[in-house]
Amino acid sequence: MNMETNRIATLTLDDGRTLELPILKGTLGPDVIDIRNLGKVGLFTYDPAFFSTSSCISEITFIDGDEGLLYYRGYPIEQLAENSDFLEVCHLLLNGELPDAEQKAEFISNITRHTMVHDQLARFLNGFRRDAHPMAVMVGVVGALSAFYHDSLDINNPQHRVVSAHRLLAKVPTIAAMAYKYNVGEPFVYPKNKFSYVENFLYMMFSTPAEEYVPNPILVRALERILILHADHEQNASTSTVRLAGSSGANPFACIASGIAALWGPAHGGANEAALKMLEEIGDVSRVAEYVQGVKDKKYRLMGFGHRVYKNMDPRAKVMRETCYEVLKELKLENNKLFELAMELEKTALNDPYFIERKLYPNVDFYSGIVLRAIGIPTNMFTVIFAVARTIGWVSQWNEMVADVEQKIGRPRQLYRGAERRDFVPVNKR
């Protein structure tokens, strides 16, 4: 990583003092002003939601929102989604390089051997109500993994971190499928080593003891792409939460549970569910023009369009759009009402100056909800699928953070605007 700096930003204070702040240059993206010296003169920056603050140095994911670029370790997301499989991408994110054939086989074997969960953990689910939201179950059960796997909790031991990473990657899909089965009142299905990672997940979700389950390769590939496209996305809310929790020295299972909790928020992990709900509210192709006008009149919200980061086309959206076609064709749902609605809404919005000027292009969430529903995944499991995908990103970011010699416990500052000093008054004198 290029951390050389030969440029300086000079800050001049109103009392005449000056402070030199180094300008750091990354491999890609904008330069960054190193403001750590501000604290020495009693100053701090004010940046709500940290939109202009780099919280860490990372080599994992790069996003250029203006150009519509998303790279994992330098590889464009489109290339990985089209040519790779999920575990290969997991190896890339975790270890920095795509594996060769031998490394890939070893990595797959390691993950496969960890897909089972402790039997007591299965009983732990019985403490939840049957109608508990699957994300509530995920937060509790993933966090509880640390109570079952004591042999890999030393975060300063690199081998322990590897074992924990493999366990999380392997067990989160099993727990997710168990949360679904518990919710619908069906028996838990244990993983089978003969299946691939994604095949196993679909098998644990949808098979029953009554009949043989045969994975559909088109649906497997579709879910594979969804997992790849959502595997990491730089320093978003949930990833930042994982890093902040991890900075205290918390064990990896607790850190990933904190990420799941942050992802649960509708502004983060619930976007595809919101887009699907919007299509259902529109109801019919004949209402699209009316709805679009309602969006322009601030009467309705257009979900699944635009992105906080991408000011151009979301690079994941094109892949997801093609996947949507493939799945609906395979399931003979080409005339699917929601998909027809989505295509008409997309066409109308992309040709309307209002949306063009505001760069409101369809994002990945606009299509992924349709695909997930077609596969048979219920709406309350959408964010769980997101968590399954993002686990590898969280683990990779956590691992990078722990190994960073510059890492300290996270401690944001604040601009205080509360009461000034005042003395306590006894209750009978107030």
Image (cartoon, grey):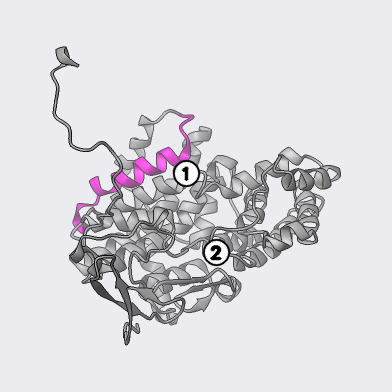
Displayed quadrant of residue 161: bottom left
- 145 inside magenta stretch: yes
Q: Is residue 389 above or below residue 65?
A: above
Residue mark closest to the camera, 2 vs 1:
1
Q: Residue at x 30, y 49 (%)?
A: 415
Q: CA distance from mark 2 to mark 1?
A: 19 Å
Which residue is at the far right?
Answer: 286
| Horizontal side, residue 17 vs residue 129: left or right | left
**Amino acid carrying mark 2 in the image:** Leu
Q: Which residue is tagged 2?
A: 229
Q: Position of residue 53 (x, y in %)?
A: 38, 64
Judged left or right of residue 411, residue 58 is right
- With respect to residue 88, does 224 lie above or below? above
Image position, residue 162 (x, y; %): 28, 66
Q: For the residue labelled by badge 2, is the local secondary structure a helix, a strand or a loop?
A: helix
In front of the other: 260 or 132: 260
On screen, residue 84 above or below 364:
below
Q: Which residues are magenta?
A: 130-152
Q: Where is residue 193 drawn, in percent x and y?
A: 44, 60
Residue 100 lies left or right of residue 365; in this view the side is left
Query: Disc 1 designates what residue?
Result: 265
